[in-house]
Structure formats: structure tokens, C-alpha cells
Image (cartoon, rainbow, N blue to C red):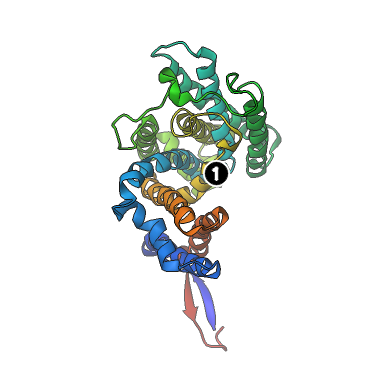
Amino acid sequence: MIQLEKRKEPSKFWRIANPFLAVALTMLAGGIMFAMLGKDPFVAIRLIFFDPIFSETFASYSRPQLLIKSAPLILIAVGLAIGFKANVWNIGAEGQYIIGALFGAGVALAFFPAPGWYIFPLMVLAGAFGGFLWGMIPAILKTRFNTNEILVSLLLVYVAERILAALSLGLMRNPDIAGFPGSRDLRRYEAAHNAELFANTGIHWGVVAALIAVIFAYAMMTRHMLGFHIQLAGQAPRAARFGGVSPARLVVVCLGISGALAGLAGMFEVSGPGGQVRIEFASGYGFTAIIVAFLGRLNPFGIVLAGLLLGLTYIGGELSQMMLQLPGAAIQVFQGMLLFFLLALDFQTNYRLRLTRGASA
């Protein structure tokens, strides 16, 4: 018989190997799914993972796009990982991303068409503040009324989407284009445009912010008392309370940080690649960042690699939709498989499979 046996201590080998094995299984299962849809699985996998980087036809466009797609994923995932380490489960980063974009765009539209170097910094502060405020709603409800932050943060995503739609059709609507929802294009407003810092590289201020967030998170988690409290609360909650760690304070700090970083990601997106507030602005980055956080093992530098990989699936997914007419939902399922296999394989970190005889079992 096959029996699960608990390891004396977590396996370092499987902790590192599981993400790579999950990627391989995702390719296999995704290939089967693509074949069932009537597409060549080898061509589909090649378009998703290899052609955006190595193909002479697509690489000149796709390589800069890799940083553009990965930056918001990394920025959001770093904030989520801090909370996840403390068992604070923010599942509503998508809503914080939307609200951050609305706050940042609101500052730009309020100043339009005035020039000024101060406008973009104010947008950055407003974007972070908007995401922070939206993150504080589940934080306050959790600390004051002991609500479930998973449900509250998730439901707030749908509230944020309704606010986005209302503003796209109302207050933020471009008055110069009657009959069409959406704000002015911020890419045409120089003072508010998050332009590339170096031509044809994809590097904008969002990429810089993502790298700063990675360094900040690593330093905080390894060199600061707050990081120690976060890890202790996640690994031994009772010991943390006996040690004087305030669970309510950690909830507020973790949801505040993750909300602010998600809001920043939204602001950099609406002022750069996205360009305008519109009903379709919600891109799913907040949900995909959950996969990035776990695939990166909640480690800031691991999140960078995972963010690049998931960013690659966004670009490759767009190519496969264009070249093979794959449905967009299939690409979302493909991304979801990655988290499914990772979670399914993670039992190997703490348990091992053992063959036993029937009698002894």
C-alpha cells in the first residue's frame, strides 16, 4: 500500500524542484488541452514560451513587452507575499490595482492640460494611497469585527470594477469624444505619461518601482524586526502572540503594504501601457500575481523569475490567439494550471510517499 509519511523537516530539494516540475506538468497538460481544441500543441507551447524571446519575427516587439507585462505582476506579488508569510490572505489585489489606477488618473485629469514636473509624482502618491485605502477596508473589518479578509478583499474586487465602469461612463469620461466610454489618453499628456526611460527596452517607472519593491521586501524580511515578526506569525502564531507580536497590527501592515503596491501597479499601468481609464482596464494582474507569489516561493527574488515567466505567458498567449486563434479563456486556464500543479505537488515538501505491506499498514 502507499502511505503518506510526514518528514522530520521540510524537504529543501522538493521546495526548489516543485516549481520547475509544476511548469513541466503545465506544459504537458496544456498541450493536451490545446490538442483537444484542435490546435497543434507543440506549436502552441512554442508560441507561448519560446517565440516571444527567441523568434526573429516576434522578438523585437516581445522582448520589451516582457518587462512591461512582468512589472505589475512582480510589484503586486511582492506585496501579497509579505502578507501570505504572515497568514494574511489578500485575494483582492485586483480591486486595489483598479482603485490605485483611478486615484492616479484622477490626479492627472484634475490637472489636465497644465504642464508640471510635480504631476507625475503626485500621481504616484495618489495611486499608492488609493490602493492602501482599499486594502484598509478588509484590514479594519478583520481587526474590529473578525471578518474573513479573503472574502472581503475578493468581494471588493467586484465593487472596484463597478466603480471603474461608472467613472469610465461618467466623471472621468473624455468630453472631447462623445458617445465613447473611457477617459482621455494619458499617453498624450506628457506631464502624466509613464513613458519608457530607455527607448525600445520596455523599462518605465513601473519596472523601476518593482525592482525597488523587491529589494525593500528582501531587506525588510531578512534584516528588520518587522520581517521577523511577519515570519514568526506565519510559522508559529501562538509563539508570536506570547512574544508580544500584535496580530491586528500585522494585518493592518500587511494589507496596507500589499494594497499600496497593487495601487502603484495600477497607476503605472494606466499612465503608461494602458493609457486610459476604461471599462476593460481590469486585466487580471491582481489574480495572476497570486500565482507569481506562490511560484516564487514568497521570496522576492523568486518572484522576479516567476513574474517574468507569467509575463511571458501573457505575451505568448496573445501571439497564440493571433496565430492559432486560441480562445483567451484557454490561456487563462493554462495559467491557472500552473498554480494547481504547484499546490498539488507541494505535499512532497512535508510528506513522502512510502510503500508499505498490507499487514503493517
The residue shown at (44%, 38%) is: 75
Q: Which residue is mark 1?
A: 284
Q: Position of residue 336 (x, y in %)?
A: 53, 56
**Residue at the extreme right of the image, as rendered:** 145
Q: Position of residue 334 (x, y in %)?
A: 51, 59
Numbered marks: total: 1
The residue shown at (51%, 55%) is: 331
Q: Is residue 280 visible?
A: yes
Which image quarter holds the N terminus?
bottom right
Q: Position of residue 286 (x, y in %)?
A: 53, 42
The residue nearer to you, when weighing 271 against 295, is 271
Which image quarter holds the C terminus?
bottom right
Q: Position of residue 30 (x, y in %)?
A: 49, 64
Q: Is residue 8 visible?
A: no
The residue shown at (46%, 43%) is: 77
The relative height of residue 338 versus residue 41 in the rendered view (above or below) is above
The relative height of residue 302 versus residue 122 in the rendered view (above or below) is below
> Element under label 1?
loop
The amino acid on which the numbered mark 1 sits, given as a three-letter code, is: Gly
The residue shown at (46%, 48%) is: 293
The relative height of residue 238 versus residue 251 in the rendered view (above or below) is below
Q: Quadrant of residue 205?
A: top left
